[in-house]
Amino acid sequence: MSFLIFQGTLVHAESASQPLKILHNHIIGVNKNKIVFIEPEGRLRELSQQHGFQLEDVQVMEGQFLIPGFVDTHIHAPQYVYTGTAMNLQLLEWLNKYTFPTEAKFANLEFAADAYRKVVHRTLKNGTTTACYFATIHKEASLKLAEIVAHFGQRAFVGKVNMDANSPEYYVETTEQSFKDTEWFIKQVQCLNNPLVTPIITPRFAVSCTVTLMKKLANLAELYGLPIQTHISENKDEISLVKELFPECSSYADVYQSCGLVTKKSVFAHSIYLDDKEIEVIKHHGSAVSHCPCSNFMLRNGILDLRKLWDKGIKLGLGTDVSGGYSPSMLSSIRQSVIATNVHKMQQGAAYNSIDYKELFYLATLGGSQVLGLEDRIGNFVVGKEFDALLVNPKAAGSPFDVFNSSFSDSIEDIVQKFLFLGDDRNIQEVYVSGRKVIPTTLDSNSFF
Ligand SMILES: [Zn+2]
């Protein structure tokens, strides 16, 4: 049967102003990879005749509900190997002491394949149906990540990282090699011919790239019609260094703008200290920002004023920023975002309009899809969109929270909220990407490739 049909509760974001909508007693039908109907369950019989499916094929969700898959707009796949460790330093020291030595090991393809299998499997288990990955400077290992993503069935943007300046001698490229390897990588990923996997241009950050390389990368992005991802304005020392390295530019955003890297397909991670002019630059070009609060707290970089960017109309999504962020779960990003916005509320006073959990649910799903230019394909449950979804079971074995059905009965809204604040991968019973069930999987994260 090519049909998937679920009956019960659907929870999704309709829009920024309707960020968490609950559809009770509905049925959703998926044919191959696309949603073909979403209707009240009273129409079930009629729909079965119309679409030719049997009533016994309907998966009835008793006490469970469907949400769209999470979109992680910023994650470093190689850093997964030391996630949950090395939280004692600030950004620039952290990069030199932990990150670069680890990423350099990805020259070894076997090591890379093992790490990448594990991170793809782990993020899928945690409900990340779309990930925007940084890999390393190594073209073969970066391609391996793309292949593993394709094999496990995740939707992803995969970037071979570019670094031709201010980097350790054991982990740096020449400008020419960086450019050539990137073009090779783009062509190889395109040869995979997988509509779920897209190469993304990935200059690490302005500090580790020359102007020449950044301009060449901008040309590549234009030539191949590709998105771009990088970091911006994450840490005060980093910002001072960028000022020192690029005295001809008026700001950090201006460095990227002058190189042609600020486009409507660009994703800028962090953006904590952008001034109003820089925010205007991002907005003017239609670029997006990935908010990574777990990482911002752990590396003690600062706290983004998410509401300010929201009110300015910047495209926004959430990221785990593994492993500056210690958790590969987008649920953690949602929770840390609540803490971040609460800090702003405490600092700025009662008039400050903090971001609520419903808006964060929107950012983790539909907002993320907009950041990556995928809003016409995924992000919520709309007829014609691809089916990227999580079947959430609040009463799963070992669930880290309890549901009350007695006199203090939980509403479905309470249960969704409990899942967002207390749930984990044990509650994520099934994961679908483009209509394919990818969790549970028979693929072993230890033993293929
Ligand atoms: Zn990052």
Image (cartoon, rainbow, N blue to C red):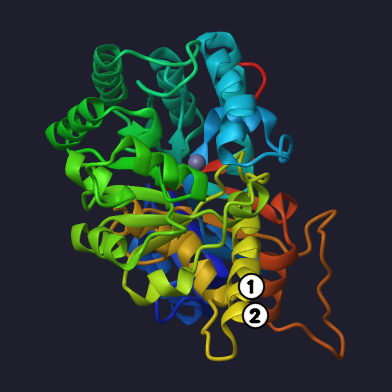
Q: Answer whether labels 1 and 2 touch (C-beta < 8 Å).
A: yes
Which secondary structure lies at badge 1?
Answer: helix
Q: Nearer the viewer, residue 212 or 11?
A: 212
Q: Is residue 259 left or right of residue 196?
A: left
Residue found 24% across the figure and 13% down from its top: 176
**Residue at the spot of label 1:** 343
The residue under the point 39% across, 69% down is 309
Q: Which mark is residue 346?
A: 2
Image location of residue 42, percent across then percent down: 48, 81
Residue 380: mark in rendering = none
**Whole-number angstrom distance, CA of label 1 to CA of label 2:** 5 Å
Question: Is residue 290 shown above or below 98?
Answer: below
- Could you tell me which residue is drawn at 72 percent across and 71 percent down? 418
| Residue closer to the observer: 49 or 409 | 409
- Is 313 situated above or below 225? below
Please, what is the three-letter code of the amino acid marked with disc 2?
Met
- Asked if residue 243 lies left or right of residue 65, the reply is left
Q: Secondary structure at mark 2?
A: helix
**Along the viewing direction, whichever of 289 and 38 lies nearer the viewer:** 289
Q: What type is the residue that disc 1 sits on?
A: Val
From where the camera sits, is residue 100 visible? yes
User: Picture coordinates of residue 47 (x, y %)?
Assistant: 39, 70
